[in-house]
């Protein structure tokens, strides 16, 4: 980087980056577009870097540069592209089109080359995107977000950031923080701001809809590795045998190869092991159980010690193990690191040493004693913690929803292997030593306590270590949970024994467990509160810990089962139906009375906790994709039934007490309980009874809550039974209306009902109440009641606004799921995907039931438009909020308030809903797949449109016209649009609209036809209708098909063409300039051919007019040094590549290109296109400095003072969606043109380069502004 680091821009031009910006990106390792360009290296250093990599060192950017240079000069072959490479790059390409933040995931097993593949993708995309690796602390997501947005915005041209990270756990937080930062900085992205590229090691077998790399080569990969092996054998004859990192992959991860490479460990003996053998054992154990781990070279040398070794390298000292170990340096600022050459080698060495008597536990204890002395470095503590406490995922990915199971192994892999190969005693001894070595760390004694109570059943030791863990981290509720689990499991273990246990012993243990869980509850409440940090910022516990509440209920369940099984009187005692003192004699132990306070508190405490979980599970779930474990609901319901439902309280005196008890028996005594009736699959008769009971309660004692629960029960009954023909009594509606507006102190459930009742129906455009104020009050109510406990969880939609009137239009979520099930009885539903991707709203039956709400997106918020007023609501998917636009959506309600689901753009001038296709790549051929419900849709990739009345799914691919146009049926015709091979996989298309590129003003509609390519004979089909951009077919059948147009004699056809400009990779400036139709397949083919030869695209605007086929076209360049242009003219034809080559030997300035045309028998030239080629467009070095300014920035003051009329400017900016209607009105409100221009320039400059270009174009094209623009451009 002789000229300094440079970043790519969206237009393909590089911009230089100053040291100030580089230094500010401290958390990112930025891969610059010109990385290593112009730098020279010592050949021996380059060779050693390559050798290290093939031996097993982690990849570094220089490896890719070496490979690229070798492929360029013919001395080597390029990096092998693994299966998944094309899919990843295509996914990234597709994600880049979507504004905002998106994610691409690569899962890989350790040692299979996943990190190399991820870095290879970044390296190959560095000139198109701004690539970086997250190297800083993963806990600083807010700071990472700031740096990512800064990297995106750097320079005058923004560009998408591709960020590689290896921590899947921070994805959601980081995505939220980046979105918040974009919002704060008021960035209006026209493309993806950042694509988070998650590269995650998974040691379990994976089956996922993301890209997965496993420890096995495919049939297409094997030949590539064999060829590479031959090349390396020729270049590195003597060293190739020790290229274990490469050889293991080339042999398809052969265990035989690994075993043979590790035979040196077969001679290891347990007694009198020299230091080098012990060090090799340490490295093997660490790398086998913690992928990516290492030791420092200095540590290793210190451990080996002997003075007579002082002049020897680590490699010499470690013989005969040296060939299995690699030493490398991650970057110039870090110390040299040491690790085993491959994970499989580390695993094999560990196994061989165990066979020789050097056990895993022995090595682990020695590791702790010898390498963890004094103050242990933080990074080494992390490795030890992972090795001894990290629990791996237990099962594969769910085949239906691709979400990983939350179930984990009980202990770390090392502890489990020691237990399996050796004994419980040895597993415990390792954890005990770690607990003593790391005296401040709470996780080691916590793991030891768990091992003691789960495996050893030594509850005394378990209690001791759990207490010690609490002492080390006294404010951590999750650490405190372990003590409660110890006592709970001890109690459960007593229950399972055949020997009867005395009630006193049961109650003593239960008391200890309950006290531990109550202490955990208190900690959970306090640790979730905001705490001030030293830097003045705030930190809030992300997840509220409910384990203490749930542990309490589990203990009550166990205690109930054990005591009642011994004596039925305990049932009445535990549920407070009799006092303990009245039945002490029958219980057989007078000393039990000391537990009376505990027992008297149980029923009320159980009821409170069950009510909490009723709300917790009804209103929320862990995240948008995953549900809570089923045992939480099961155990909670069981405890509630035992203590509350099956045991009416004594002395029920009030009139409605018996009704309330019936509701408790049916778990419907709260609003959440009523709301969960459908989820609990209550029958119609059960819901009828619940409705009646709530009506009775309301009638006997006026209560707003009772009235609301009666409303909700009635709504649930409608959703279960179907719409009622009899209207709901107005008396109840009027009573509720009198309470409006509700106080924020009322429960959120009441506010939700108010919004459901008073949100305007589909025939109304006004609301009796201020909807914004009702929503604000509901938010306040939620903040007070639930935010602390629900804040980190996904709020489930409870109801949706449907079509119709009254309560009949309130649709429960469960009803929508039932509709989908009815339509797809044979298909197992993946509800996590249906909701997280909002696929449920594509179902025509669902759409038929729901009311579509019109609205608008601006300032990263979505608003419902009601009677001309904009009402802010939440968005289910925040990625829908990037672009200001008119939208429509379905309105759902969570316990926090209204939420927009299924947000879709309302296209101007049309009713086509644009969909992004799913893309698969096989052997570089792309297939596009689409699914939709009923409606009018357009594919964003090809502009293909379709109309259907039900669910439809299909795929298509682009085909070449080359072989088709020579067929007899195509004589006198030329292609008019792309040739598409469409395959319907489900459903039926009523109308198909094929895109075309013909200027309809130059032809008649009867000239169009559609070619069907079929093995039984090709057919031309007449079209139903022709528009300016599409031809319409009714009830189409499918084969490869495309629009063609007849070339009538004497009638010229005009077509819309793009101009593609490429700067070739030649010594002197050589440009290839193509004229290509609006066919993405043809354009992609041209781009691939050019870029494969090293050409670089120079993005420029295309002609805004159509070009006449068969005209002659001339290209000229106004440059002082002569430009050689070949051919001198070309005849525009569809059947060949139309391109010019421009050669300029000593180009060093800006120049203009002009494309002119002449018609038959005419010498007059008509200019059809011009563009300016700037010096910076074609210079190999970075040509635009960091301070480069746009025309509208340079001439800001002049434009403010000399523009007379802003009306035409505002109208065009609004039409091109550069400014919103709100901004338009804001500008118009200023009384002077100077202030209006100031505001216009503020909006345009904040919107980025595209907006500036559009404003510049307006100035150049409008008659009243042309003179001023020419004058300013002439002035420099």
Image (spheres, helix red, strand yellow):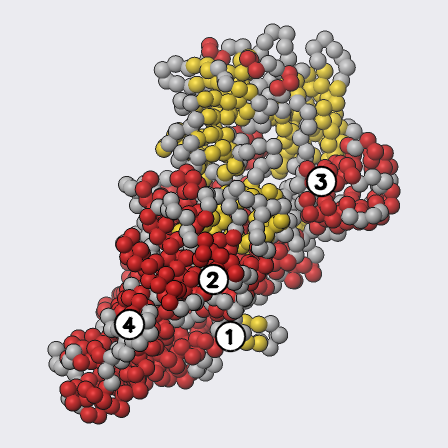
Q: Label 4: how many residues lie within 10 Å, few (<14), some (14-19) or many (20+)?
A: many
Q: Residue at x 57, y 32 (%)?
A: 910
Measured Cα–Cα span from mark 4 to mark 3: 66 Å
Along the line of sight, which residue is nearer the eye, 173 or 688? 688
Measured Cα–Cα span from mark 3 to mark 2: 45 Å
Rendering coords of residue 144 (x, y %): 57, 61
**Which of labels 2 and 1 is toward the front?**
2
Q: Label 3: how many residues lie within 10 Å, few (<14), some (14-19) or many (20+)?
A: some
Measured Cα–Cα span from mark 3 to mark 1: 47 Å
- Judge from the rendering whether residue 112 lies leftward or rightward of residue 542; answer left or right: left
Give residue 655's quadrant in the image: bottom left
Looking at the rendered structure, which numbered label has been put on residue 750?
A: 2
Q: Are marks 3 and 1 in contact (CB under 8 Å)?
A: no
Rendering coords of residue 358 (x, y %): 27, 72
Q: Residue furthest left?
A: 498
Is residue 918 in sight in this rendering?
A: yes
Q: Are marks 4 and 1 in contact (CB under 8 Å)?
A: no
Rendering coords of residue 1153 (x, y %): 74, 29
- Judge from the rendering whether residue 418 lies leftward or rightward of residue 943; answer left or right: left
Q: Residue at x 33, y 74 (%)?
A: 654
Measured along the vertical axis of the image, is residue 307 above or below residue 724?
below
Element carrying mark 1: loop
Residue at image mark 4:
644
Q: Earlier in the sequence, mark 3 or mark 1?
A: 1
Residue at image mark 3:
1213
Q: Residue at x 57, y 50 (%)?
A: 767
Q: Earlier in the sequence, mark 3 or mark 2?
A: 2
Q: Earlier in the sequence, mark 2 or mark 1?
A: 1
Measured Cα–Cα span from mark 2 to mark 1: 27 Å
Residue at image mark 1:
529
Is residue 955 in sight in this rendering?
A: no
């Amino acid at each position: 980087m002789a000229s300094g680091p440079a970043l790519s821009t969206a237009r393909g031009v590089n911009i230089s980056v100053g040291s100030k910006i580089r230094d500010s990106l401290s958390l990112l390792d930025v891969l610059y577009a010109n990385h290593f360009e112009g730098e020279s290296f010592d050949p021996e250093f380059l060779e050693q870097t390559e050798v290290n990599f093939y031996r097993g060192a982690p990849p570094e950017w220089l490896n890719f540069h070496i490979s690229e240079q070798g492929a360029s000069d013919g001395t080597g072959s390029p990096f092998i592209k693994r299966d998944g490479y094309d899919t990843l790059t295509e996914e990234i390409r597709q994600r880049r089109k979507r504004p905002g933040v998106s994610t691409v995931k690569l899962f890989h097993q350790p040692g299979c080359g996943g990190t190399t593949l991820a870095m290879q993708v970044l390296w190959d995309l560095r000139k198109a995107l701004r690539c970086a690796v997250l190297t800083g602390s993963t806990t600083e997501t807010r700071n990472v977000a700031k740096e990512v947005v800064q990297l995106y915005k750097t320079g005058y041209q923004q560009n998408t950031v591709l960020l590689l990270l290896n921590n899947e756990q921070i994805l959601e937080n980081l995505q939220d923080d980046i979105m918040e930062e974009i919002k704060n900085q008021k960035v209006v992205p026209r493309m993806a701001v950042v694509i988070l590229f998650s590269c995650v090691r998974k040691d379990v077998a994976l089956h996922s809809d993301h890209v997965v790399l496993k420890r096995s080569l495919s049939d297409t990969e094997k030949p590539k590795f064999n060829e590479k092996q031959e090349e390396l054998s020729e270049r590195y004859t003597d060293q190739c045998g020790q290229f274990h990192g490469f050889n293991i992959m080339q042999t398809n991860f052969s265990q035989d190869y690994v075993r043979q490479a590790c035979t040196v460990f077969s001679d290891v003996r347990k007694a009198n092991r020299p230091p080098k053998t012990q060090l090799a054992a340490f490295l093997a154990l660490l790398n086998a159980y913690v992928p990516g781990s290492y030791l420092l070279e200095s540590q290793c040398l210190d451990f080996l010690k002997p003075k007579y070794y002082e002049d020897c390298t680590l490699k010499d000292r470690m013989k005969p193990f040296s060939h299995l170990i690699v030493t490398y340096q991650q970057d110039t600022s870090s110390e040299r690191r040491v690790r085993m050459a491959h994970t499989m080698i580390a695993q094999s060495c560990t196994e061989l040493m165990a066979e020789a008597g050097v056990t895993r536990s022995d090595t682990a204890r020695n590791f702790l004693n010898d390498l963890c002395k004094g103050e242990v470095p933080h990074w080494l503590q992390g490795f030890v913690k992972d090795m001894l406490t990290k629990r791996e995922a237990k099962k594969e990915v769910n085949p239906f929803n691709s979400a990983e199971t939350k179930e984990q192994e009980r202990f770390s892999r090392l502890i489990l292997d020691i237990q399996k190969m050796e004994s419980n005693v040895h597993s415990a001894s390792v954890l005990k030593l770690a607990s003593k070595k790391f005296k401040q760390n709470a996780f080691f004694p916590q793991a030891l306590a768990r091992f003691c109570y789960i495996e050893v059943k030594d509850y005394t030791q378990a209690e001791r270590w759990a207490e010690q863990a609490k002492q080390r981290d006294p404010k951590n509720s999750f650490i405190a949970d372990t003590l409660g689990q110890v006592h709970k499991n001890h109690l459960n273990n007593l229950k399972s024994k055949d020997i009867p246990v005395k009630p006193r012993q049961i109650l003593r243990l239960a008391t200890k467990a309950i006290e531990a869980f109550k202490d955990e509850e208190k900690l959970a409440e306090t640790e979730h509160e905001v705490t001030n940090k030293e830097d003045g910022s705030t930190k809030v516990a992300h997840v509220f810990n409910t384990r203490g509440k749930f542990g309490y209920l589990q203990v009550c369940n166990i205690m109930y089962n054990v005591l009642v099984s011994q004596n039925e009187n305990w049932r009445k005692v535990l549920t407070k139906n009799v006092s303990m003192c009245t039945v002490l004699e029958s219980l057989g132990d007078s000393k039990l009375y000391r537990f009376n306070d505990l027992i008297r508190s149980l029923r009320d405490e159980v009821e409170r906790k069950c009510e909490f979980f009723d709300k917790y599970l009804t209103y929320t779930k862990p995240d948008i994709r995953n549900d809570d474990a089923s045992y939480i609901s099961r155990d909670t319901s069981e405890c509630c039934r035992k203590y509350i439902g099956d045991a009416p309280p004594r002395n029920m005196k009030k009139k409605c007490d018996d009704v309330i008890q019936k509701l408790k028996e049916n778990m419907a005594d709260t609003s959440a309980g009523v709301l969960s009736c459908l989820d609990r699959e209550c029958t119609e008769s059960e819901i009828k009874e619940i409705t009646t009971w709530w009506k009775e309660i309301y009638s006997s004692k006026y209560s707003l809550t009772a009235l609301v629960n009666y409303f909700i029960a009635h709504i649930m009954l409608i959703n279960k039974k179907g719409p009622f023909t009899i209207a709901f009594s107005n008396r109840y509606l009027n009573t509720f209306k009198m309470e409006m507006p509700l106080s924020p102190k009322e429960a959120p459930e009441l506010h939700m009902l108010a919004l459901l009742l008073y949100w305007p129906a589909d025939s109304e455009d006004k609301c009796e109440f201020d909807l914004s104020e009702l929503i604000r009050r509901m938010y306040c109510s939620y903040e007070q009641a639930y935010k602390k406990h629900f804040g980190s969880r996904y709020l489930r939609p409870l109801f949706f606004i449907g079509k119709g009137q009254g309560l009949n239009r309130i649709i429960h979520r469960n009803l929508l799921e039932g509709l989908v099930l009815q339509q797809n009885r044979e298909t197992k539903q993946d509800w996590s995907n249906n909701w997280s991707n909002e696929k449920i709203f594509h179902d025509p039956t669902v759409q038929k039931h729901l009311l579509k709400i019109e609205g608008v997106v601006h300032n990263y918020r979505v608003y419902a438009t009601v009677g001309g007023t904009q009402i802010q609501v939440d968005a289910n998917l925040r990625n829908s909020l990037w672009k200001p636009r008119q939208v429509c959506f379905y309105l759902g309600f969570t316990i926090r308030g209204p939420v927009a689901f299924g947000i879709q753009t309302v296209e101007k001038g049309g009713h086509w809903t644009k969909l992004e296709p799913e893309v698969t790549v096989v052997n570089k051929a792309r297939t596009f797949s689409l699914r939709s419900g009923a409606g009018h849709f357009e594919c964003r990739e090809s502009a293909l449109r379709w109309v259907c009345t039900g669910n439809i799914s299909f795929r298509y691919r682009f085909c070449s016209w080359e072989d088709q146009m020579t067929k007899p049926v195509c004589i006198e015709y030329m292609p008019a649009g792309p040739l598409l091979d469409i395959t319907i996989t489900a459903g039926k298309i009523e109308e198909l609209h094929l895109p075309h590129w013909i200027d309809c003003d130059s032809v008649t509609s009867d000239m169009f036809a559609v070619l069907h390519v079929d093995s039984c004979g090709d057919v031309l089909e007449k079209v139903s209708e022709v528009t300016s951009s599409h031809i319409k077919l009714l009830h189409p059948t499918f084969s490869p098909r495309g629009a063609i147009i007849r070339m009538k004699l004497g009638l010229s056809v005009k077509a819309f063409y793009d101009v593609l400009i490429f700067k070739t990779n030649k010594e002197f400036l050589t440009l290839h300039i193509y004229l290509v139709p609006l066919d993405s397949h043809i354009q992609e083919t041209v781009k691939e051919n050019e870029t494969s030869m090293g050409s670089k695209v120079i993005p420029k605007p295309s002609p805004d007019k159509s070009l006449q086929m068969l005209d002659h076209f001339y290209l000229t360049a106004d440059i002082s040094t002569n430009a050689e242009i070949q051919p001198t003219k070309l005849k525009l034809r569809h059947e060949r590549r139309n391109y010019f080559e421009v050669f300029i030997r000593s180009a060093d300035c800006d120049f203009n290109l002009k494309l002119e045309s002449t018609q038959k028998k005419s010498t007059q030239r008509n200019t059809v296109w011009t563009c300016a080629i700037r010096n910076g467009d074609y210079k190999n070095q970075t040509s635009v400095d960091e301070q480069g300014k746009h025309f509208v920035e340079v001439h800001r003051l002049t434009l403010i003072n000399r523009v007379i009329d802003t009306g035409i400017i505002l109208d065009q900016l609004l039409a091109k969606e550069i400014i919103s209607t709100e901004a338009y009105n804001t500008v118009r409100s200023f009384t002077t043109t100077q202030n209006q221009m100031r505001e216009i320039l503020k909006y345009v400059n904040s919107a980025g380069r595209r907006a500036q270009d559009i404003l510049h174009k307006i100035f150049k094209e409008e008659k009243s502004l042309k003179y001023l623009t020419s004058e300013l451009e002439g002035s420099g």
